[in-house]
Image: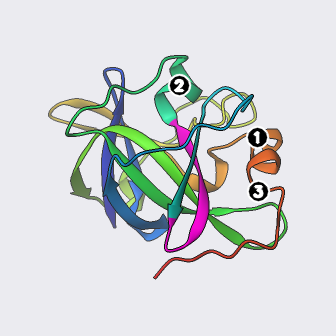
């Protein structure tokens, strides 16, 4: 399976490319006033507004730096109502991929009931990589805020 790698601080994470619609350079994000922590705002993709979450801000409490390697990853995220919606993820160092068998990943030892992003891990010559499943990325309360209007389509492809 092919994974896109990205970083949060000095830690590396991987997303299954099957969950990704597109990877874009960091575009202008329109802030949303009084948005919950981690919500960077909105941008328009193919004529449709897409909510954007800054993974660094959501997980670490600080915004991702605007670097050439910082990307906007558009993923298909379940909206909690049986459909998927596009969600933008701002991620640092999202420039590399790896190909690994899913069986090579082992449990992290931390249950996802305690840590949303506690997916399985794999080691390589640079250290640990944790598999981040887009379906379990957001707490239900944040997902419900971002996808309140269930009528918006997933405009991928």
Magenta: main secondary structure:
strand
For the point 70% across and 32% down, which residue is it?
Answer: 33
Residue 48 on the magenta span: yes
Residue 108: mark in rendering: none
Does 154 sit above or below residue 11? below
Give the residues drawn in magenta, as a range.
Answer: 45-54
Q: Quadrant of the N terminus?
A: bottom left
Q: Position of residue 68 (x, y in %)?
A: 19, 39
Extreme bottom residue here?
157
Per the image, the residue denoted by label 1 is 142
Does 13 sit above or below residue 61? below
Q: Quadrant of the C terminus?
A: bottom left
Judge by depth and name the residue closer to the eye, 114 or 96. Answer: 96
Mark 2 vs mark 3, CA separation in Å:
19 Å
Mark 1 vs mark 2, CA separation in Å:
14 Å
Mark 3 vs mark 1, CA separation in Å:
9 Å
Q: Position of residue 113 (x, y in %)?
A: 75, 35
Extreme top residue here?
61
For the point 53% across and 61% down, which residue is it?
Answer: 44
Residue 147: mark in rendering: 3
Residue 57: mark in rendering: 2
Residue 137 on the magenta span: no
Disc 3 element: loop
Asked whether the residues under the numbered discs 1 and 2 touch, taking CB atoms below 8 Å apart as contact, a structural biologist would say no
Does 7 sit above or below residue 101? above
């Amino acid at each position: 399976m092919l994974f896109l790698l990205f970083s949060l601080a000095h830690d590396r994470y991987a997303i299954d490319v099957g969950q990704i619609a597109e990877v874009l350079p960091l575009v202008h994000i329109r802030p949303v006033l009084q948005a919950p922590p981690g919500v960077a705002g909105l941008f328009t993709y193919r004529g449709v507004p897409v909510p954007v979450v800054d993974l660094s801000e959501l997980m670490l409490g600080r915004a991702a730096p605007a670097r050439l390697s910082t990307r906007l990853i558009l993923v298909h995220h379940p909206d909690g109502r049986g459909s998927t919606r596009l969600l933008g993820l701002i991620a640092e160092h999202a420039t590399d991929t790896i190909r690994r068998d899913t069986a090579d990943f082992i449990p992290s030892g931390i249950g996802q009931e305690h840590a949303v992003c506690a997916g399985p891990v794999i080691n390589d010559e640079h250290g640990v990589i944790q598999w981040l499943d887009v379906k379990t990325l957001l707490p239900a309360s944040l997902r419900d805020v971002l996808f309140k209007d269930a009528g918006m389509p997933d405009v991928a492809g």
